[in-house]
Amino acid sequence: MNKAGQYDEYQISAKDLRELPLEHVSAVAALSYVVSEVNALRRIFLSQSDECTGQTVIDEALNVQKLVILRTWSSKLFEIKEFLEILCSTKPLTDDVKLCQLALEAIADLKVSTTLEGYQVARDLRNEASSHYSFEAAKKNVPHLHEGALCNMYISDTGGNDFFPLGESVMFHGRLHRRWKNIPSLEERRLKFDQWIMWCVEANESLIKSHAKFSNNLIFSALGRNKFYQKNYWVPEPLVGHPLSRMTPVFSRINRLNSH
């Protein structure tokens, strides 16, 4: 067994929540849902291997898994902007001064200005290659396929190990090449890519702070108590580890349920 860490636990019941305005409970619940999701995705992303094996097939499988998680994480963070905007623009929510003000502050804190490159990339991928799958986008991306792009297809005898770089090359890399078609320098494109990751990290941290503000104002203060209980939790050893020392598996040994 290993200690997962010390938690400050706030105990709240369904009965407590019924004493509060429906809109306030709903806003905090939705934000709590998002924060739990993006924190899980961030943990999983940090547990992906960055090392290259020198074997094209294996390295591509590593990249596919890592990028799936990154795109999903990014799309979740993008979605929260629209949720917060609803709190500021939908009646009767706009008549709730406290809720609307908290939402406006959260939007500002998230730094989701459309001028940020990371936000723009998150939007493009969310619309065309993560939350939605766009045939029209695929047609636009194909002409931007690089000559050296890996377009093979790999099918394994074990379930879940199949992967198809053709899709990644067109839907993901092709989309980025299309976005950055006027940036010929590979180094500059890598910088843009890094800006996207940094936007995810910063947006994640800002969201956590915004969630705390909503909770403090709409739950803790409203109930007239902000007492937390410090607790330690112990979990099985395999479930705890530093991300860099406990990588997420890329290949499965489970046999395929239904063969081709």
Image (spheres, rainbow, N blue to C red):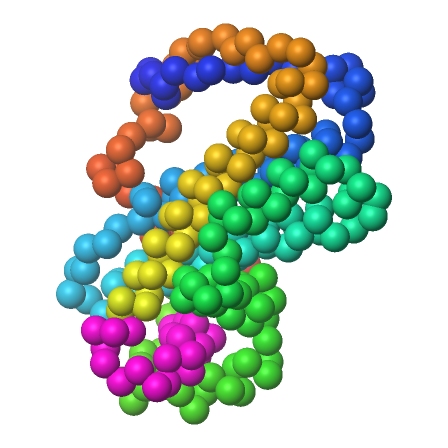
Q: Residue at (51%, 70%) from the top-left corner?
A: 124
Q: Which stretch appears magenta?
A: 161-189
Q: Quadrant of the N terminus?
A: top left
Q: Pinpoint residue 133: horizontal percent, then vertical percent.
A: 59, 71
Q: Residue at (21%, 73%) from the top-left corner?
A: 187
Q: Residue at (70%, 37%) from the top-left corner?
A: 99
Task: Check the image and report above or below for 198 versus 192.
Answer: above
Asked whether residue 175 is drawn in magenta, I would say yes
Asked whether residue 25 is drawn in magenta, I would say no
Residue 174 visible, this angle: no
Q: Nearer the viewer, residue 142 or 123?
A: 123
Query: Which quadrant of the structure image shows residue 5?
Result: top left
Q: Pinpoint residue 85: horizontal percent, then vertical percent.
A: 66, 52
Task: Check the image and report above or below for 181 versus 68.
Answer: below
* Number of marks in the rendered image: 0
**Residue most extreme to the left:** 54
**Residue most extreme to the right:** 92
Magenta: main secondary structure: helix
Image-based side of 138 in relation to 146, left or right: right
